[in-house]
Image (cartoon, grey):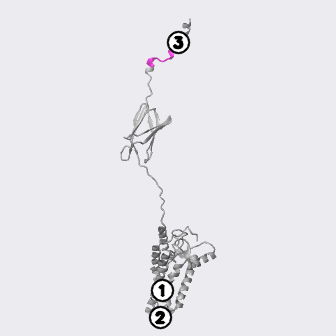
Amino acid sequence: MMLLLLAPAVIARAQEMPSASAIQNTPAVAAATLEGTILDVSGAALSDAEVSLSSRMGEPRRTKTDSEGSYSFTALPAGEFKLTVCLPGFDSFTNPDIVLASGQNLLLSPIVLQVAVVSSNVMVTASKQEVAEAQMKSEEKQRLLGFLPNYYVVYFRNPAPLSAGQKMRLAFRQAIDPVNFGTAAAEAGLEANNEEFKEYGTGAEGFGKRYAAAYFDDLTGTIIGSGIVPALLHQDPRYYYKGTGTVRSRILYALSWSFRCKGDNGKWQLNYSFVLGDIAAASISNLYYPKAIRDDAGQMLKYSLFSLASQGVSALLQEFLFKRVTTHANELGKNENSN
């Protein structure tokens, strides 16, 4: 009786289950494979390159290339994949458009890695002498009213000290400037017209002697006072333009240059170069001045006092006037000073 009651249920369950033949005829989902090689630009195989294969369906799979540059991924499901290759010293490579079908064995074209371009920022710092050279070249372009040399004024906020060689070159550049020949001629003409230094005589001969004396005075004063002595004493023969502060402070600053200057160490010093340069130039002038002039102590004192006064007057003019009428003033640093 019990068996009769269970028979319909067993029969129904049997009808729901697939037959053995049906199970054998169901197709299996085949796995896909992906493989390829990694090369450099010369075509050589790259080993130990890290190859990563990722998709939306799971965690990325990783492998490394062998000694022949080959890699492979097996048992992959069908779908879309992104392939990434990384190797130190080379640019990384990414292929985001790989599509695998079920059971597909895909061999990718060889991937060529480019050598990475290493960028580096190199801080190039010019030496003090190179900075001074650039500043000196700029100063050599400075001319009052476009033609009078105005080399010995510095408009830079923190000028680099000149080397001994640079001081000598700047002095020679000043001494041989063509304008100096014209100013010597004008000075000789005034002396002849005012009948000064009668010992030189009159006429062309007198003018020639006055002209030679005037030019050599300037030549020796510049070479010795602005070149040799500053080089030996490590002092700067240039005037450092201030350009800021009250009028009174600037006047006092300018006048102080009659007896002080900046040393190559950046500190204020007594202006021994100016004093010794004057003495040396006056001593040399005795070689070509007439005996009556050489023996005139008053004339030598007059010359020294005039030189001292002219230093102060020149500094005042530099501070308040000359920059406005100087071409190429502060060409390398026009934004450093506003005045």
Q: Position of residue 171 (x, y in %)?
A: 47, 77
Q: Residues within 10 Å of mark 1 (few under 14, many from 20)?
A: few
Task: Give the residue type at disc 3.
Answer: Val
Asked if residue 60 can be seen in this view, the reply is yes
Q: Mark 1 or mark 3: which is in front?
A: 1
Quarter residue 48 falls in:
top left
- Callout 1 secondary element: helix
User: Is residue 155 covered in magenta?
Assistant: no
Q: Which residue is mark 2?
A: 199
Q: Mark 3 or mark 2: which is in front?
A: 2
Q: Mark 1 or mark 2: which is in front?
A: 1
- Marked residue nearer the N-terminal end (1 or 2): 2
User: Is residue 20 covered in magenta?
Assistant: yes
Residue drawn 45% across the image and 20% down it: 23
Q: Residues within 10 Å of mark 2 (few under 14, many from 20)?
A: some
Task: Give the residue type at disc 2.
Answer: Glu
Disc 3 and disc 2 in contact, CB within 8 angstroms: no
Q: Position of residue 136 (x, y in %)?
A: 48, 72
Q: Which mark is residue 57?
A: none
Q: Which residues are magenta?
A: 10-22
Task: Give the residue type at disc 1.
Answer: Ser
Q: Rounded to the nearest whole Å, what is the CA distance between mark 1 and mark 3?
A: 140 Å
Residue 283 higher or lower than 30, as above or below: below
Q: Which residue is mark 1?
A: 283
Of residue 173 and residue 31, the one placed in the foreground of this image is 173
Q: Quadrant of the C terminus?
A: bottom right
Lateral position of residue 135 relative to residue 42, left or right: right
